[in-house]
Image: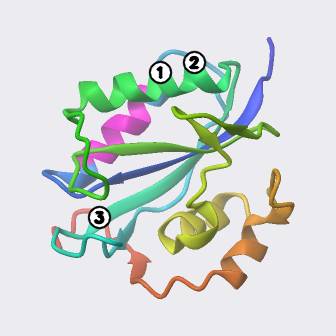
Amino acid sequence: MKVGNKVYLSIGSNIGDRESNIAQAISAIEVPRENYNLSSASFYLTEPLYNLNQEYFINTVVGLDSDLNPFQLLDFIKSIEHMLGRRKTLKRNMPRTIDIDILVHGSSVIETKELAIPHPGLINRKFVLIPFDEIAPDFKIPYVNLTVNELLVRCSDTSLVKMYELGNKA
């Protein structure tokens, strides 16, 4: 079996049953393939950035081995978002039932209108770096050439990111 590339995804939700939305997204990611070697960080309660007039998010990061190329993976996660009720919107930083972002895809460096890898916001977002650091602190981010832990230590984001207790409806 082809092992594929190590992929890390950020998953977040701040509408509806946020816990369930994220759990369903993780399950949908696992379903189509076996031996994905999926690892998931804890869930974190995080305050919204940029648009502060919305509910807090629950966020996590998952890592997996994937034989999909970056654009196939993008299509796959967009189909999961659609299945879980995410509606297309032209406005950025708005509330959403589910948001799945490709953080890294192996050693790929891509910058197109549809996709940027590594994710351009990765280095400035504690809500991504803290769960990412939990599962892959020594992973070196392509192009940036720093580990997740090194990025977390250097991150200037001061927003609230705290461990989320499952079952807590805060």
Query: Residue beneath label 2, please?
Result: 72
Mark 3 neighbour class, 10 Å CA radius: few under 14, some 14 to 19, many 20 or more: many
Image side of residue 51 versus residue 121, left or right: left
Q: Residue 75 carries which label?
A: 1
Is 21 located above or below residue 85 in the figure?
below
Residue 9: image location, x then y, percent = 55, 45
Q: At x 56% / y 25%, what residue is drawn?
A: 73
Judge by depth and name the residue closer to the eye, 18 or 68.
Answer: 68
SS class of the residue under badge 1? helix
Residue that carries the numbered disc 3 in the rendered image: 57
Where is residue 128 drawn, in percent x and y? 53, 63
Most foreground residue, 116 or 138 = 116
- The C terminus lies in quadrant: bottom left
Q: Mark 1 against mark 3, which lies toward the viewer?
A: 1
Q: Residue at x 81, y 15 (%)?
A: 2
Gap between marks 2 and 3 measured at Cα: 27 Å
Going by the numbered disc 2, the residue's amino acid type is Gln
Spot the residue most to the front. Answer: 113
